[in-house]
Amino acid sequence: MEPTTRLVTVRGIPFSLQTAGTGPGLLLLHGFTGSSATWAAFLPEWSTQYQVLAPDLIGHGQSAAPTDPARYTLEEAVDDLLALLDTLGIDQCIVLGYSLGGRLALTFAVHAPARVSALILESTSPGIADPSERAARKAQDEALAAMIEERGIAWFVEYWEQQPLFASQARLPADVRARIRAERLAQRPSGLANSLRGMGTGVMTPLWDHLPQLDLPVLLIVGAFDTKYVTIGQSMAAQLPHAELVIVPDAGHAVHVEQPEIFQNLVSTFLQRVTSPR
């Protein structure tokens, strides 16, 4: 089924939203520098059984990019998602999030547990527990935000692609790398800068203490090359009551890009399990 893209205004902000399919709700949340296009390869399968909702997060893609960083916090984004689901008449959904989108998905489940039936978290952190480390990350993100505004998107994309987090993506086919780069180059400096200021890990309220209370199925997906997030995933799995951790071989931070078939199979199998009648 072909997805439909439209603008939906909630809480005064126009959001670009892709929808496809019918059935249980499946909310897809992309990562920093991404958009709903992140999930394009997976929509044909998932939309055959689920009502897929893929918004561009605030400051990303075709959604609005307000000038006030305070509008970009994860708590504000949770309220946006609640308003979006209310507008669409969806009481509860499964939420899949990658990186920044995973942190938003986790925050959403903590703040509105009745609205989330299951979580799929790819390369996700519950935040930085140590206050001094968190403060250092906040300062680092602010410095990068200022550089994005000063030097522009082309400079930032070149810088971002050199981060060790994405080193394993150098092995990807040229057309895949070009698609990812195009998605990043289509962003706006103000949107990315304010996303760092409002949604960065340095300003995120750590959620580690909330993990034992999350009484829902959780699939954690990490790439074996992404050793930092493998460790985080192992710690999360030990604290979540109903979590399954999958470490995907030959993949780094973006498992959905580096091993798309494995990623799709993992997600589809989990979806089938949590939505099948018992």
Image (cartoon, rainbow, N blue to C red):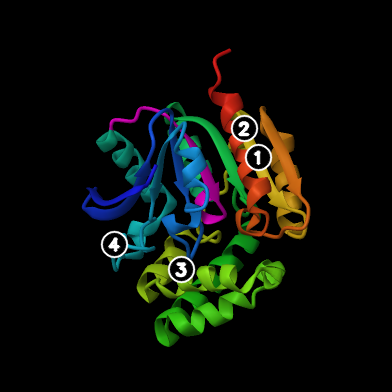
Q: How far separated are the C-alphas under marks 1 and 4?
A: 32 Å
Element under disc 2: helix
Q: Is residue 216 visible?
A: no
Residue 201 forms part of the magenta stretch: no
Does residue 276 lie above or below 271 as drawn?
above
Image-quadrant location for residue 22 = top left
CA separation, marks 2 and 4? 33 Å
User: Pointer 2: what residue?
Assistant: 270
To which residue does mark 3 refer? 183
Name the image quarter holding the N terminus: top left
Pinpoint residue 12: horizontal percent, then vertical percent: 21, 52
Residue located beneath label 4 in the image: 64
Mark 2 and mark 1 in contact? Answer it, CB < 8 Å: yes
**Foreground residue, 58 or 52?**
52
- Mark count: 4
Residue 14 in the image, given as x and y percentages of width and height: 24, 55
Q: How far across and down, in percent of the image, does residue 177 sit?
A: 58, 71
The amino acid type, in three-letter code, at marker 3 is: Glu
Query: Residue at 61% of width from left, 25% of height from top?
Result: 273
**Other-residue count near label 1 (Cα within 10 Å), few / some / many at <14 / 14–19 / ≥20:** some
| C-alpha span from label 3 to label 4 | 16 Å
Q: State the mark number for residue 103.
A: none
Residue annotated with mark 1: 266
Dot 1 amino acid type: Leu
Category of crowding for the residue at label 4, using alpha-carbon neighbours closer than 10 angstroms: few (below 14), some (14–19), many (at least 20): some
Residue range (magenta):
89-102
Which residue lies at the image location 37% right of the left edge and 41% below the top edge? 20
Mark 3 residue element:
helix
